[in-house]
């Protein structure tokens, strides 16, 4: 599980320059020693700070997954399988899968003490949509109307400035809602 999460962290940039994959590759021909280096690597993921094996600082990955380094001895074939897996794009894996795996990896007593329970995306969306997304959507529509009004009144710079603000809001909301396409009048650069 620790290797899988490290591959995900590699893919989404939480570990810079595919550091975990490069770390795996550095043990080619020395797979029998990998568990020693991996133990150090996983401890650094738990604590955060400089990881000499990667020559970079790592964030602290809390949540208990790396509290105990669980690196096992492996052979060259197993190392190659890890390297092949690390070359994949883990960024597109649905976070719910990791949540379910992490929740199941915890001891039931510890899970209860921590209050650790993964909340599936549909439940989160059911809460977020009416409390956050709907008010933001109203703000976005108001900013869009203001931008169009300013542009139509001849204030091309002000109209584009409002469009910039509404575009930023759109980006913030894009995970749950896709806005209508921008009118052609806003396709030009605001500096023209």
Image: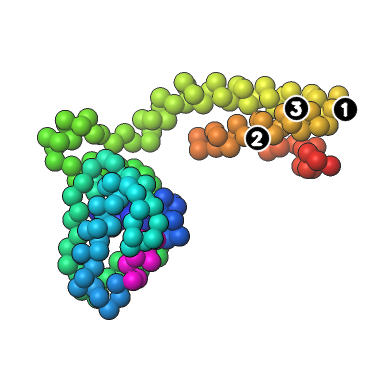
Task: Please name whichever residue, 122 or 102, is drawn nearer the observer in this view of the structure.
Answer: 102
Within 10 Å of the Cα at label 1, are there few (<14), some (14-19), or many (20+) other Cα atoms?
A: few
Please name the residue shown 12% across and 35% down the image. Answer: 109
Instruction: Provide the residue designation for mark 3.
Output: 147
Q: Is residue 105 left or right of residue 145?
A: left
Kindly give the residue lying farthest to the right in the view shown: 154
**Labelled disc at residue 121:** none
Instruction: Provide the residue designation for mark 1.
Output: 154
Magenta region, mostly helix, strand or loop?
helix
Alpha carbon separation for disc pair 3 and 1: 11 Å
Percent from the top left, x then y, of residue 42? 26, 54
Alpha carbon separation for disc pair 2 and 3: 11 Å
Percent from the top left, x then y, of residue 119? 31, 34
Percent from the top left, x then y, of residue 122? 38, 33
Residue 21 within the magenta-colored segment of the rendering? yes
Please name the residue shown 24% across and 58% down the image. Answer: 40
Q: Is residue 106 left or right of residue 190?
A: left
In the rendered structure, which segment of residues is drawn in magenta?
19-26
Instruction: Provide the residue designation for mark 2.
Output: 167
Marked residue nearer the N-terminal end (3 or 1): 3
At numbered mark 1, what does the secondary structure look like: helix, strand or loop?
loop
Task: Please name whichever residue, 144 or 87, is drawn nearer the observer in this view of the structure.
Answer: 87
Alpha carbon separation for disc pair 1 and 2: 20 Å
Percent from the top left, x then y, of residue 125? 42, 30
């Amino acid at each position: 599980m620790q290797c899988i999460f490290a591959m995900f962290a590699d893919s989404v940039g939480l570990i810079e320059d595919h550091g975990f994959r490069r770390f795996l590759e550095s043990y080619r021909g020395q797979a029998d020693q990998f568990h020693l280096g991996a133990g150090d690597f996983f401890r650094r993921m738990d604590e955060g700070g400089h990881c000499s094996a990667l020559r970079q600082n790592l964030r602290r990955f809390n949540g208990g997954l790396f509290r105990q380094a669980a690196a096992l001895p492996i052979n060259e074939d197993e190392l190659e399988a890890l390297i092949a897996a690390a070359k994949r794009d883990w960024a597109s894996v649905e976070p719910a899968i990791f949540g379910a795996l992490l929740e199941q990896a915890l001891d039931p007593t510890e899970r209860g003490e921590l209050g650790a329970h993964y909340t599936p995306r549909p439940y989160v969306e059911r809460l977020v949509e009416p409390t956050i997304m709907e008010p933001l959507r109203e703000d976005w529509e108001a900013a869009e109307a203001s931008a169009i009004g300013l542009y139509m009144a001849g204030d091309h710079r002000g109209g584009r400035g409002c469009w910039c603000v509404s575009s930023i809001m759109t980006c913030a909301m894009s995970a749950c809602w896709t806005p209508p396409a921008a009118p052609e009048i806003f396709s030009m650069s605001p500096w023209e």
